[in-house]
Image (spheres, rainbow, N blue to C red):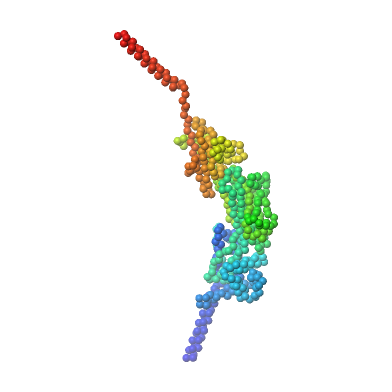
Amino acid sequence: MKRMKKIMALMLAAIMMMAMSVTAFAAEGAAGTHTLTVNVKSTTPAQDLKGQTINLYKLFDVTESKSGETTNYAYTVNAAYKEAIKAALGTSFTGTKDEEYAKAVLALDAKDSVNVQNFANAFTTYALTNNVTATTNSGKITGENTTSYTFNNLDAGYYLVYVTGGKEIQSSLVTVDATTNTVNLKTEAPSITKTANKETAEIGQVVKYTVTGVIPDTTGYAEYVYKIHDELTKGLDFVNDATGAALEEGATTVNVTVAFKDTGVTDAGTTPTTATLDSKNNRKMSLDLSAWVRDNQANKRKEFTVTYYAKVNTNAEVTNNNKASLEYGNNPNDTTTTTPSEAKTNTYPLDINKIKKGTEDKLAGAKFSLYTSEENAKAGTNAIKVSGSNGNYVVDPTSNNTVFESVKSIEGKGYNLHVNGLAAGDYWLVETKAPDGFNKLTAPIKVTITKDGDTNWTVKNNGTAVDDKIIDVENSTGSLLPSTGGRGAIAFAVIAAILVFGVAVSFIRDKKKEEK
């Protein structure tokens, strides 16, 4: 019996040891088998990881053990980051043991508390300032509209996640184990937006462009690149001010104005007043704000604007997509360029089909002028200036001509008169000369052009929408007016002859009666 009890005791001990070993194995998991998916912050505007680098710092190794339904975690501080963790905890922390480090981080408070976020940001600042190497990183991420990135083959641990070059230091903390494999970034990448003060513009008009940005947090960076690049389409030219002052021949710079949006913000350093033009394309410019944003770290996270001007030229298109992008990063040899922000200024054509009334026969030789008010149209004053020939014209403020003329046909077109370079709005079309043999229009035609999205527009002819955007202008042939002589004289003579004949017949009849 005693022998049996000993055997049973030995078996029970063996079972317990086996159970403990299984629990320990399950707790630690296999090293290097975990994944972590990093998602961009869910904000408006949408964030994108393209061109960015994600750094992971494993602050603690972690093991897990199960006690019934409870999971217990044991953290071992990563020696590579011991000094950085200590610095982030602050001068009040004096611990030396792993459990003291873990206890101090745990005591920071609940998930996503201010204290926890401050610790994460402080660690990142120390790491950046002291060139502390990350445990692993994503490398520069490629691909359009990248909203997440997955790290594979990670050891279990307590990780800090940081995206380099964010507009502020805002790191995330996460325990990576068998159950946790995602984290949502709290930081945002620097970005800019570009706007125009006109949605539509006429050739010769000046458009004011505004680029809005935010002073990034450059803490810990020995160098920081922050450059705005802008490219105009062929329908625009840079000018120096709102009056349209042209650039000098061979100019290498264009005037810009940089200012904080909020009043009362003290500008530090030297604020740039010009941007550099591309030596091969003077519709491209670059504005280097790198030194300026570093000098204004007291104003980090504050918005600023960059304003400059461009004039619409005779090459204007319906949709002028003018793009501005931001180049940024803490390594001048490895920067990130944002997806361009577009400001669209539209310019529209007026297409006229001059035809014989009641037919599709196109008529050449009709002359027109265009006005921006009915009063001017009726008075024949202040007509829009144009240049061109052979049925194709453009608005041209420098021209002395205000008349455009139809042709018999324009190859491949459903119209025979084209005027390009108008802004949206109301216009009055006046026929100044009709084709030979046709009557001139007696009243102006009201033409209304309305913006309808970035690439579409509507046209109305005297208030009626025109599906094909072509204004049909019909002319009637003239009628011969009445005159004296001619057929009128012949008719009178015939009538007189009839009367004379009647009188003669009556005289002869009366004479015969008398003879009887």
Image quarter where the C terminus lies is top left
- The residue located at (54%, 66%) in the rendering is 182
User: x%, y% of residue 356?
Assistant: 47, 35
| Occupied quadrant, residue 151 | bottom right
Residue at image point 58% right, 48% down = 198
Q: Where is residue 149 shown, x and y percent of the image?
A: 56, 63
Q: Is residue 6 above or below residue 210?
A: below
Q: Residue furthest right?
A: 270
Is the residue 178 above or below the residue 47 in the image?
below
Q: Is residue 56 visible?
A: no
Q: Residue furthest top?
A: 515
Left or right of 316? Residue 360 is left
Residue 6, how many percent across, how many down? 50, 88
For the point 47% across and 33% down, the residue is: 476
From this view, report whether residue 295 is shown above or below residue 156.
above
Count of marks, rendered view: 0
User: Percent position (x, y) of residue 366?
Assistant: 52, 34
Is residue 251 visible in the rendered image? The answer is: yes
Q: Nearer the viewer, residue 295 or 162?
A: 295
Q: Residue furthest bottom?
A: 1
Identity of the residue drawn at 47% across and 31% down: 477
In front: 151, or 509? Answer: 509
